[in-house]
Amino acid sequence: EPEVTQTPSHQVTQMGQEVILRCVPISNHLYFYWYRQILGQKVEFLVSFYNNEISEKSEIFDDQFSVERPDGSNFTLKIRSTKLEDSAMYFCASSVARGVNQPQHFGDGTRLSIL
Amino acid sequence: QKEVEQNSGPLSVPEGAIASLNCTYSDRGSQSFFWYRQYSGKSPELIMFIYSNGDKEDGRFTAQLNKASQYVSLLIRDSQPSDSATYLCAVNRDSSYKLIFGSGTRLLVRP
């Protein structure tokens, strides 16, 4: 069964450094998403991406964050200057379309630890 | 008022029993409702989704939706120890791309 793949599985970074999290969505999916989950808390939406542009973003997704689809398969989340509070699991998700019967499928996540 | 509310649990049931997981939501504009299973330290795994009032069955799982009461539930029949996990309810407005998650209910199935 096709799946969303994320790399790396665990990223350790010094505070203030830039980090790029990578995702390969399911191949026929057109909508891409990033979510995060701080330890012990709920899954939170960050951003959605369609047709090479951001379609929706949350308040969390400030100027320190950016997303890109650099080629036909990868989808990346960049955090420009990491903070301690950016430590979390980051999940990439994708869906075929948007609508009432279009579920989002999640990757295994990247655990980001900021020191 | 929280957008999506779930009892944190744990909900403890014996093996073979029916587990009933509940979720309420505050936005009447919500259109799609999803149940995900999340094992500790892992990613959300889609179990099923529903968008019409009534019941939807898939194997041992039944999702129930009542839009008038703003309530969605998940029934797990013949519960197995491997079903022990946190179950996340998520909702989506048709005008929005994002899923809004509840905090999840931890289910423990006792052998």
Image (tube, coloured by chain):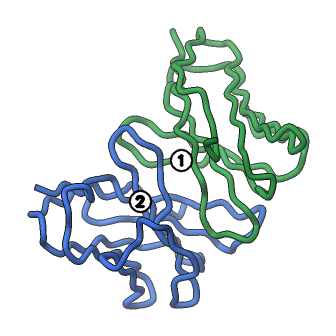
Chain colours: A blue, B green
Secondary structure under tag 2 reads strand
Q: Which residue is mark 2?
A: A91
Residue type, label 1: Glu
**Which corner quadrant of the image does residue B92 belong to?**
bottom right
Residue drawn 42% across the image and 86% down it: A69
Calculate the distance from the C-alpha at mark 1 to the C-alpha at mark 2: 11 Å
Residue at point 12% right, 63% down?
A: A13
Q: Position of residue B9 (x, y in %)?
A: 53, 21
Quadrant of the rendered image containing residue A68: bottom left
Q: Which residue is mark 1?
A: B45
Mark 1 residue crowding within 10 angstroms, few (<14) / some (14–19) / many (20+) = some
Work out whether B58 lies above or below A61: above
Secondary structure state at the residue bearing disc 1? strand
Q: What residue is at 85 percent from the left and 37 percent from the top?
A: B69
Give yes or no for contact between labels 1 and 2 (Cβ–Cβ under 8 Å).
no
State left or right for residue B63 relative to residue B5. Answer: right
Say which chain tag 1 marks.
Answer: B
Q: State the residue at coordinates (60%, 80%).
A: A30
Give the vertical position of B15 relative to A81 (above or below).
Answer: above
- Closer to us: mark 1 or mark 2? 2
Q: Is B50 located above or below residue B64 in the figure?
A: below
Looking at the image, residue B1 sits to the left or right of residue B57; the answer is: left
Residue type at mark 2 is Phe
Q: Position of residue A52 (x, y in %)?
A: 51, 90
Q: Could you tell whether A67 is left or right of A13 in the image?
A: right
Q: Does label 2 lie on the same chain as label 1? A: no
Quadrant of the rendering where the N terminus of chain B is positioned: top right
Q: Chain of mark 2?
A: A
Q: Which residue is more in the foreground, B26 or A98?
A: B26
